[in-house]
Amino acid sequence: MRSSSAYVVASAAALSLLLTAGAQAEDGPAAPADVESSQVPASVDALLAQLARVPSLRAHFREEKRIQLLRQPLVSEGTLVFARPNWVLRLTESPEPAAVLLRDGTLTVQDPGGRRVLQLDASPLLRGFVECFAYVLSGERAALERHYRIDFQARADSWLLRLTPRDPRLLRMVKQLSFVGQGAHVTRMELLETSGDVTGMEFSQVEFGPALSPAEKQRLFSLPAR
Amino acid sequence: VASLSRPWLLWLPIAALLAWVVVTRWQVSTAITRFLPDSQSEEREAAEVAQRLVASELGRVLVLSMGGADAGARAKASRGLAADLLRSGLFESVRTGLDDSAQEAAHALYFPRRQYLLGANPERDVSARFEPLALERGASELRRRLGSPMGALYARLAVDDPLLTFTTRLERLQALQAGGLQVRDGVFVDPSGENVLAFATSRAAALDTRAQLAVMAAIDASFERQQREQGNDLRLEMAGVAPFALESERLIRADVTRVSLFSSIALLALFLVVFPGVRYLLLAWLPLGLGMLAAMAAGLLVFGQLHGITLAFGGVLIGVGIDYPVHLFNHHCMAPPGHTPAESLRAVQRPLWLGAITTVAGLAGLAWTAFPGFREIALFSSVGVLVTLLATTTLLPPLMPASGRATRVQSWSVRRLAQLPGALAERRGVARGVLCAVLLLPLAGWPRLRFESSLAGLAPGSPALRAEDRRVREQVGGMDSGRLVVSTGDDLQAALRANDGVAAALDAAVVAGELGGFQSLSAWLPSRALQERSLGALRAVPDARGRLLAALENAGFEANAFAHSAFFEPPSVPPLQLSDLRGSPLNEVVRPFLADLRGRPAIVTHLREVRDPEALRRRLQPLAAVVYLDQQVMLTALYAEFRQRALELTGVGLLAVFAIVWLRYRSLRATLSAMLPALLSGACALSLLALAQVPLNLLHLLGLLLTLGIGVDYGIFLLEAGSGSRQWVSTLVGIVVACLSTALSFGLLASSGVPALRALGQVVAIGVPLSLLLAPVVRVALMPPEPADG
């Protein structure tokens, strides 16, 4: 009976992925020493293990979207909050206030145009997509391999993780996703669309937080009143 | 010997034929709509639609909800249940969720047709979209969406749908479902996420209780399997018509069985005490059995089915029809030695026929009601009564002992009662006093009579079953199961056009706050006419392309990129049709909206949170071929109409009885003496219930009719027996026996768990014994004393 929230939802997936520097990771005690380690992981396995240890984080973001339909890039800035396993709140402060909340399998977008609620897991494709991203952080490489071709490069002081969708339906929209980081810090995310549009997101002032209690999560991950 | 065997020879093939009819056509219904009038009123039309919906595919849908265990186990259980049920072959379809294919289908079907789908009122909506301010807003919304995290999606569609008509349509479809079903792990879940939901459509009709038993057994078996595999803490609840039908049938069947069993035992005891030998008892059952059989066969032949309430009435006939053999036997036993059965029959034949005819006349009023259920009861009872009497008079005398002999109880009764007429005659003053005193009871009770304002008290289903049904329906989206809008038409397009009108009216109602929301097929499939209007409206916008491009340019877009937008080209496909959806995974989405009402397509719109039913009715009133079904209001209105009619018909029935009795005696005094006991006891029964603060419903009125029928019989029997005290006394003994058996049967009904049966039992169990007590009193009070025959 549920409407096919269809492609809106599919797209939502794309972005929910983008948004989340975090996402699903297995619960486990944080090991701040490891997490704070700025050592460059030698392999994708080492990287995934390191990311998985982040219980929660908060960061400032600056996003630049270069869209062919627009004469000028769209630039927005704000705060991103994440808590394990897959709670994300993106609060945009400029150019106009907006909020995107991902929790309980639901993505809610609130901007001056209104509020839109999307069921992320209305579609197994979408769910697989989001979960694939979670696999990155939970270190489930086999599952990740099932959905993406992975390319990992360790550089002098940073690492680069590139994901290319295997599912042709997703590939029609997303050409590649890449993450750049230092230690457990993701410093930049980039989405390259098949159309040629590029979205780049820089993270700064990244603060790792402790594991949150359910009550803290409820309080933190809610949309601002309109 | 030949004369002995003759009635047998006649009755045997008749009985076999009747039994064959009953066995081959057996069909029991419990639809309360049988008890709604079938006049051409608006309510009747609504009731008709409601009844047909129950018979349609929608009525066959069971909503299965599973809670407990964890989300993964629930999802697996939902899929496992669906697979089992489909394998059983008992289900036409089992829907547990939507997958990618539905989403792709939505894109494939709706995106190329976006120009056909520009609003419920396209002439107004489309030109409004191209107002300068609206275009500016549209352009900045597109820009905002491109900049949002879902930008990648919108970017793909932006050029060919710059006003986001497809996207907003999908969002609207989603909003329509708000608070309703969601999909997790590919299966439907309720908004809390705690329950998985499946929609199972059985092949068998919901009211086909025999087939539904198998359906329930299949569900139970599969559910137990899911529990074994996914965890014992899984719980299953369901909503639908079938569980109510099954429960009603089970309750009615249990009651009828119980009443039949106990009244049979009681009658057995009574017969053994009163009559000499078991032979009389066995003989008494013959006409009863034949009467029942004939009644069932007649009901099945005329109506194609029997309602549970009608059948219950049949069980009750045992208590009424037994009067005839009882009177015959009683007279025979108490007759002077040497009286043959034929002579005994002659002595009682006239009062028996007169009694039966008045009983039928009293019921016959029901046959002219607009209530099919009551016509069924009238036919059933009339046939049952007449055939019972016919069998009593033709079949029994040759089988009875040649000469009767009174039992000790009979002799004792005669001795005691023989003094009664004399004693009463000497106390006519007392009798009149008693009569006046009895008249006071109705006067006291009448002002307290309170009729139930709705049929809710008679609604089927135990509180537990109703609560379960409500819980599951709330999980499915809180759609109000009692309130629907149904659009019909001669063909599908006509129905779709009517349905578009409904959607537009309901949109306005939501805006006005009269309605919380609704689910309409119009959102998925507007009529072809509306779709063509939409395209026409877009084409009618002057310089639409130029105006849009200018607005986009102003909002910072590369206008050139939109220059060849397909949005302004003719659509590549024809308007959306039902067949497009039928062949796609979205068929599952649109199915619940469609019903077939005996060849006429009907489209159902589900309503949520009706806040102002009257305003809603006013909005829908002007729409042709549209019925607003508010079950509560409908039943209440029908009930009020019914009550009025039932009272009138009781009056008409009484007049008919009066006329018959008067024609027989040509004396007002005699007629009154025959009828007054019944009238008084009926009034007293209702008054006593009123004083006991029992709210009355329509079955109480039916009970009143029955009481009058039986009570008048008593009056007539006594009147007919007026020629001598011996005859009078033996008649009185017969009435006592008959009354005891009736009181037993109805007393048992009065304890029934089915509200309808209980109501019926209450009135008769009080009224008939009262008739018995009042009959001699009235007789003595009104009629001149008869000379004793010594």
Image (cartoon, rainbow, N blue to C red):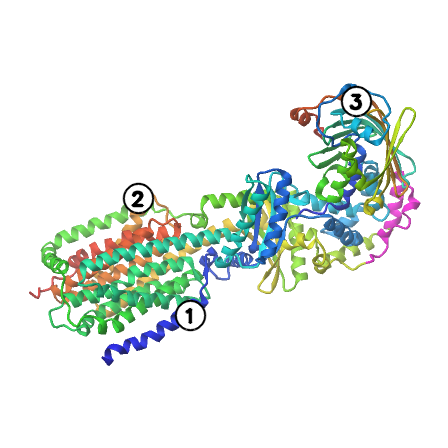
The foreground one among B116 and B286 is B286
What residue would you read off at disc 1?
B21
Mark nearer the viewer, 2 or 1: 1
Q: Residue furthest top?
A: A33
Q: Does residue B629 lie above or below B656 as drawn?
A: above
The foreground one among A190 and B418 is A190
**Residue B590 appears left or right of B609:** right
The chain ID associated with circle 3 is A
Crowd tier of the residue under label 2, counting other residues whose Cα lies within 10 Å: few below 14, some 14–19, many 20 or above: some
Q: Amino acid at mark 3?
A: Val
> What is the x, y in percent for residue B332?
17, 68
What residue would you read off at disc 3?
A35
**Residue B245 appears left or right of B362:** right
Based on the picture, tell me whether residue A129 belongs to the magenta stretch.
no
Q: Residue furthest left?
A: B790
> What is the x, y in percent for residue A141?
79, 35
Q: Give the magenta range.
A: B544-572
Q: Does residue B407 lie above or below A24 as drawn?
A: below
Q: Is residue B621 visible?
A: no
Q: Amino acid at mark 1?
A: Val
Q: Amino acid at mark 2?
A: Leu
What residue would you read off at disc 2?
B691
